[in-house]
Amino acid sequence: MPFFVFPSGRRALLALLLALAAALVRAAPAGAEDNAPALPRIRRLEPGDGVFGQFTADVERSRRRLYDRRREGTEDGAELLDYLVIYAYDSAGEDMYRLAARCNIPYAALATLNRLPHPSGFTGAGTRYLPSMPGLFIPLEPETDLERLLITGRGVDAGIPLTVRRNGRAERFRFIPGGEFSATERIFFLTEGFRFPLKTYRITSAFGPRINPVTGNLRTHQGLDLAAPEGTEVYAARDGVVAETGVDGVYGNYVILQHGDNWASLYGHLSEITADLRRTVRSGTVIGRVGSTGQSTGPHLHFEIRQFGRAQDPGKLLFRDGPP
């Protein structure tokens, strides 16, 4: 029987009705009917909001259950879904970390249930979903690098299958009760990590000061040089928009991708450009092929990552073992 907390006074009856509604709205097992009831909606994150009071009670109840199962050494079973209730909340202007703290739920649970690739995606108007149980929600149809990383690291059979209704669409997840981001996933989520733009390569020049092999001048090398055979496919290092393509005396044939407002990546010395200007591309999309155009001594990719227009060391932002 669910554990409820009821306020005293004239709102008691209303709180009782809200609590009963919340008890009926559970995350549906995989394959559940589409005519699921509406999610209980939290209006204010305050004790006076009866639905928020019920939410905090559900969180406490699910945490106790998780703690008891771990103490007993019992594996997480499908019955834990009985302790998972998903609530709706208009998070306009809310900071993800502040919301997670007020709800006593790890930010990884909020991020994965709401399918956010980065904390910046939480801001702005819109309904967000608050789970009453800590854990990871891993979509079976991943759409972002983070989601592909999550499912690659755990497999499609990890956790408990469930279906969540969102905007009239059924989304299938594997839920891992009490699960948290791994160190790599956490860094990837928090720092907007990038993947390597080549599958096979040899680093011939790192980021930093170097003698230019063509001019002989000492200059700061603003990216990585990745040697590979001519014609090797070059992949977008992260989801983005093709902001610029062209021919340059130094970079040769090049592509620039914009990743949100702050980040961009550049791909130079290409033998061929396959990306269309102003098109949105997914991470891993082929955008060109390795060449030796421009100021180059042999086939390789010159790769840069820029933040606010300034070159950053790609070695600190790239994930060699990122999503496939």
Image (cartoon, rainbow, N blue to C red):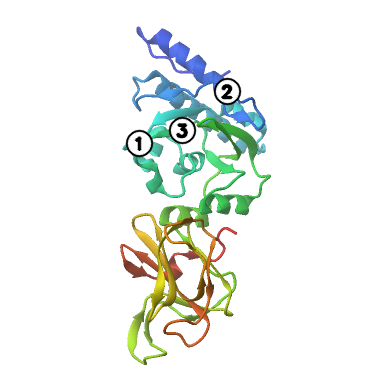
Q: CA distance from mark 3 to mark 1?
A: 15 Å
Q: Amino acid at mark 2?
A: Ala
Q: Secondary structure at mark 1?
A: loop
Residue on which disc 3 sits: 130
Mark 2 neighbour class, 10 Å CA radius: few under 14, some 14 to 19, many 20 or more: some
Residue 171 image point, x, y percent = 58, 36
Q: Which residue has dot 1 on it?
A: 125
Q: In this image, 320 relative to 77: left or right?
A: left
| Residue at image location 54% in from the left, 19% down from the top | 23
- The quadrant in which residue 1 appears is top right
Question: Which numbered disc, 3 or 2, marks the residue that appears first in the sequence?
Answer: 2
For the residue carrying disc 1, how many other residues have a C-alpha within 10 Å: few (<14), some (14-19), or many (20+)? Answer: few
Residue 56, given in percent of the width and then of the height, sits at: 44, 27
- Residue at the image position 35 percent from the left and 28 percent from the top: 45
Residue at image coords 34%, 58%: 262
Q: Is residue 111 above or below residue 166?
A: below
**Residue at image mark 2:** 36
Left or right of 179: which side holds 79? Answer: right
Q: Secondary structure at mark 2?
A: loop
Give the amino acid at mark 3.
Leu
Q: Specify which label sits upstream in the sequence, 3 or 1.
A: 1
From the viewer's perspective, is 261 left or right of 148? left
Q: Report how far apart the C-alphas of labels 1 and 2 lie in the structure.
A: 24 Å
